[in-house]
Image (cartoon, helix red, strand yellow):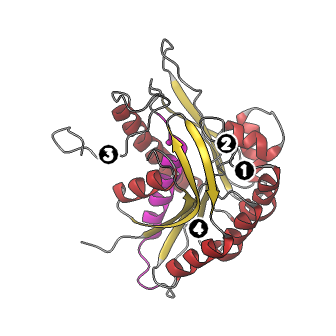
Amino acid sequence: MTTPPVVLTIAGTDSGGAAGIAADLATIGHLGCHGACVVTAVTAQNTGGVHAVHRVPIQVVDAQISAVLDDLPVTAVKTGMLGTPAVVALVADRLGHLPLVVDPVLVATSGAVLGDRSVVEAYVDRLLPRALVATPNLDEARALTGRDDPPSDLAARLADLGCAVVLTGGPEWRPGQTAATCTDWVCLPGGRPEALAHPAVPTTADHGTGCTFASALAALLAETRGHCPHPDAGSPPVDLTADVLVSACLRAAAYVTTQLTTSSTWQLGRGRGPIAHTQAHPEGETR
């Protein structure tokens, strides 16, 4: 088997297994990459919400980054919950030379605040200008811009910071509603926003969807870049044309749709259930 690309996720844990590093590593592995991880926070969390957060000291976050970079040829990086301005700045400084897919996690599905105003400012000033792609949802895009514009305009405003933007769409579904389509807005720096529509899945088993999409996008872009044989060897950067980004976004969205379709039949937890992180056998059974 060919040596896989390495995708590093930097995020918090989810003790319920739905989001954060659990979602990231499963997704990265499903899509053919090797997942490495840096833990920024440990959360006591389940489908009902976030009950406690312990932020990892920045020295330990830095040591984890060093341990990975010193030994593994990281091809792409996906970030999730960073939690503090200092960690946001650390990631920008230490990993800004690599393709960064930034999921600016600010608020949990349950409504728990995972990043305050100072974290928002650090994203805008330090990390997004160095990112390859940012994947905010509508609420995060509003927080990052301080505006309540249409999604297409918000995507363009964030792209003005210097990174490509995929503003992920999809209103929250509730039983009794008719599922239609979700619309993501994709914009390259200096470009025009493009709408990408994909099916909406009627389910409340969707906790971890944003993490899964961003991780899938990072893995698919890493596939484009290819395996780097040695940590110090370097490899060609992703040529992030509109065609490359749109293709990766459509594939990532299709992956998420498949996983949501699987989890839509599940009954796990008393709150918003987890998106599926199982794989299907050829016969159609999951494992």
What residue sits right under mark 1 in the picture? 115
| C-alpha gap between disc 2 and disc 1 | 7 Å
The earlier-in-sequence mark between 2 and 1 is 2
Does residue 285 appear left or right of residue 155 in this picture?
left
Task: Give whichever of discs 3 and 1 has the lower sequence position.
Answer: 1
Across and down, in percent, residue 259 comes to 38, 39
- According to the picture, the residue beneath numbered tag 2 turns out to be 107
Q: Distance between the residues labelled 3 and 1?
A: 29 Å
Tag 3 near tag 4, CB within 8 Å:
no
Q: Label 1 amino acid?
A: Gly
Q: Nearer the viewer, residue 114 or 247?
A: 114
Q: Residue at 72% across / 50% down in the picture?
A: 115
* Label 2 packing within 10 angstroms: few (<14), some (14-19), many (20+): some
Residue ID for mark 3: 278
Residue 16 painted magenta: no
Q: At numbered mark 1, what does the secondary structure look like: helix, strand or loop? A: loop
Q: Looking at numbered disc 4 in the image, what kind of residue is underneath it?
A: Pro
Mark 2 to mark 3: distance in Å? 25 Å
Tag nearer the camera, 3 or 1: 1
